[in-house]
Amino acid sequence: MSDIQALDLKGFVTHSVKSVFQTMLSMEIELDNPPDKEGICTNGHIVGTVGFAGTVMGTINLFVSRTFGREMAAAMLGMTVDDIGSDEEVNDVIGEVCNMVGGDLKSRLCDAGLTCSLSIPSVTYGNGFRIESKGWARHEQLGFRNSQHSALLEIYVKIAN
Amino acid sequence: MTLKVLTVDDSKTIRMIVKKAFQSYDCAICEAENGAEGLAAATKEKPGLIILDITMPVMNGIEMLDRLKSDPDLKNIPVIMLTAESGKDNVLNIVKKGIKDYMVKPFKGEDLIDRVRKIMPLESKTEADSAESKPVKYFTQVEDIVVLSLPAKVTRPVTVEVEGKLQAKVQEMTAAQLKKMILDMGGVSETNLSLIKLIIAAFQQCQQAGIAVKLVANPKQSEELKGFQETSQITVSHSIEEAKAVL
């Protein structure tokens, strides 16, 4: 079984985020300095979350602005932003992006001997809320940038008791 | 013969991507959003192929696959698993269960089609059996009035297509000295921003060409049009006869 401190979590997740954006959304996204959550929160934001539990436990949170969320949904569904009629489509796309990034990380953890199962993604959206997780052995923050939009991805991991 | 494909995924987005991937082929797509619904749909529809996700609520894809394989009526239906998990153990586990192939998300629709073609032939839709591929007739003429029947759902690509046809029709009308047009929302099922933009573009094109134009919409659509700043001031007729009378 691997030591979670030695795992290249940032490398795993950077690769999968870029791959998901490129393949499913036809969007180029680059690693950037992690943006302030407050910066993303302007005019509402969306947080997609997926968890994994087993020998290792963890959670991944993806923060994007409502505007970026709508652009992501339009790109994945092959529509224009104007054609995105409801939050349901945006939430589904954000949840699916989290599922793919979480699924890839889960696979790499399992391959490293840290067996775990993946949860169904959940999505939270609105204004003026904060999501904080405590009590984890590792916490990584990664920033991504696509032209004018930023995304923040947080990873929390610990070995189960 | 039309191939029935069952896509089982809790994500509507993924089901839509699968549906789009098969749209050029002679396939009928049915959908289910979890394993339990998927089993029920498989029993009822007897699909020729199942595209199955793993992580789903109610019943996951692994359990659905186990149940499929233990049902004598369903066990021979080819299954392609679509999974976000590429770990060695996960892949070995599902391959052992007798699936035909698996794809790791993220994926492109064309890659899915390539996988399907490796296990079964896919026939392209012919124009005769594809209602979608038939050219849509947007314009009709009633006496000296041209009627543009707006499509049921206007999306950006539809707007581009209709605007192009409208431009040609306006030139044709100018040459034939026809000076009246009706935009008919009778077949429209959804009032969205793309529709509003199309209506505005049609009004502008007609006005520039000196063509009088009237919009026909039912009372519910009229109220919806008032909700958009761009169309709030447009006078709406409730029938083609009413529009003809005021043109």
Image: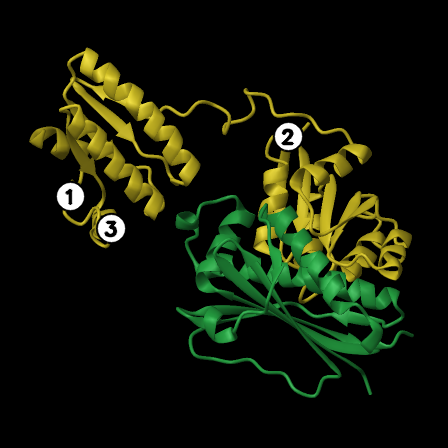
Chain colours: A green, B yellow
Q: Is residue B55 visible?
A: no
Give coordinates of residue A131: x percent, y percent: 55, 80
Q: Is residue A104 left or right of residue A153?
A: right
Name the residue tied to disc 1.
B234
Between B182 and A139, the residue placed more toward the observer is A139
Name the residue tied to disc 2.
B25
Q: Are marks 2 and 3 on the same chain?
A: yes
Residue at left offset 76%, top offset 29%: B121
Residue at left offset 81%, top offset 72%: A116
Q: Looking at the rendering, in which quadrant would you find the C terminus of chain B?
A: top left
SS assignment at label 2: loop
N-term mark: 1 or 2:
2
Q: Are marks 1 and 2 on the same chain?
A: yes
Give coordinates of residue A96: x percent, y percent: 62, 59
Give coordinates of residue B104: x percent, y percent: 75, 51
Classify A107 as above or below B75.
below
Q: CA distance from mark 2 to mark 3?
A: 37 Å
Point out which mark residue B220 bears.
3
Q: CA distance from mark 1 to mark 2?
A: 42 Å
Q: Amino acid at mark 2?
A: Tyr
Query: Where on the picture, by quarter, is residue B20?
Result: top right
Instruction: Give the number of the mark in front: 1 or 2.
Output: 1
Residue at left offset 47%, top offset 23%: B134
Q: Is residue A152 visible?
A: yes
Residue at the limit of the structure toward the left, as seen here = B246
Q: Amino acid at mark 3?
A: Lys
N-term mark: 1 or 3:
3
Instruction: Give the number of the mark in front: 2 or 3.
Output: 2
Q: Is residue B20 left or right of residue B54?
A: left
Disc 2 packing (10 Å; few <14; some 14–19; many ≥20):
some
- The answer to whether the residues at label 1 and label 2 have Cβ atoms under 8 Å apart is no
